[in-house]
Image (cartoon, rainbow, N blue to C red):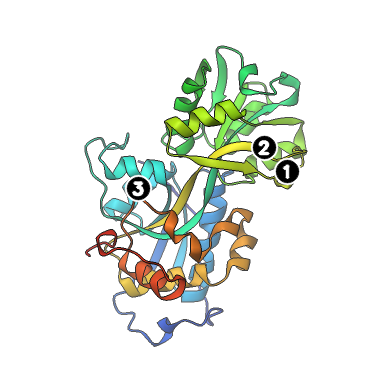
Amino acid sequence: MKTQAVMAVAFASTFAVATPATAQDRSDWPSNFTVGTASQGGTYFAYGSGWANFVAENLGVSGGAEITGGPVQNMALVHTGDLKFGLTTMGPARESMDGNSPLAPGMKMDNVCAMFPMYETPFSVTALSSSGIESISDIPAGAKIGFGPAGSTSDTYFPRMMDTLGVEYERRNGGWTDLGGQLQDGLLDVIAFAAGVPVPAVSQLEVQTDVNIIEFTEEEQAKLLEEFPVSEFSIKADTYTTLEADARSVSMWNFAIANCDLPASFVKEVVNVVMSDNERMVGIHKAAGSTLPENWDKNKVLKWHPGAAEWFKENAGAEIADDMIYGG
């Protein structure tokens, strides 16, 4: 599995967030860390590289982000310890823990721990206005649909969703920026996004051409809620300039993940930096408006890292059962 390291490392001689870590023994802390994200042009890359540098600045530890295949590959890379941190979605997390990862069938990835809640990933469909595609039912049989990087949340679930909704298609994969270019060049008919909004690639498309952001009908939404581990979601009208009203969608929760063997004191301080300054996080990406302590309970799948569990118990009144904490 190839990944690509990106982002300059960040250091800080002063700490913008006052934390107990300054008085702690850091002898077992790693000297550096990398966060597994996804493809450039997607929300994971913007969000993950942003918080990696934010944490590095505040804790004085070298850190950055890495381009990966997304949630499924991040589960594998964090499980093996190739990466210390990553970003994942609850659906792929469950499949990976159960040994059903398409990247390593039979391997139960149980050395991955929940660290903090990120945001919900809406599933949305975009087409060029010139295509005449304004609804799911308008998508012609045999349409070329870009589902994102192979193994991503979008690629894992959106084809199944299209099958459920009766869409016949040709499957295409690639990074979001690349797929956006293919859509604009007429090489694709539709892009099926699963990414935090606003998706940078969609925002870029809006600047360059006219697009349709396609919502699900109530009936389509109900079918997806019945068949998949998703929740109701509404993409707000002010998310994109194209939208004139909120768009009906479905979503999955995303969580930051950590290798379970990382020191508890280190992970606790990483969580403290991120969860103590939501304004800074929203400045990194608007989707971080949901990166809030009270959303700790959206994790129904992964065991918590002991350091993260301690932070949420102390600061969010989290009632986390011992059997949901790694090593507990």
* SS type, badge 1: helix
Front tag of 1 and 3: 1
Asked whether the residues under the numbered discs 2 and 1 touch, taking CB atoms below 8 Å apart as contact, a structural biologist would say yes
Q: Quadrant of the N terminus?
A: top left
Which of the marked residues, 2 or 3, is nearer the chain's N terminus?
3
Identify the residue shown where x is 56% and y is 35%. Answer: 193
Question: What residue did someone put label 1 on?
Answer: 237
Which label was assigned to residue 97? none
Q: Amino acid at mark 1?
A: Ala
Q: Quadrant of the C terminus?
A: bottom left
Which label was assigned to residue 247? 2
Whole-percent x and y of residue 195?
55, 43
Asked whether the residues under the numbered discs 2 and 3 touch, taking CB atoms below 8 Å apart as contact, a structural biologist would say no
Q: Could you tell whether 135 is left or right of 120 in the image? A: right
Which of the marked residues, 1 or 3, is nearer the chain's N terminus?
3
Residues at marks 2 and 1, CA–CA distance in whole angstroms: 7 Å
Q: Could you tell whether 271 is left or right of 119 in the image? A: left
Which of the marked residues, 2 or 1, is nearer the chain's N terminus?
1
Whether residue 36 can be seen here: no
In the foreground, 279 or 210: 279
Question: What residue did someone put label 3 on?
Answer: 75
Q: Is residue 310 above or below residue 292?
A: below
Q: Amino acid at mark 3?
A: Met
Whole-percent x and y of residue 237?
73, 43
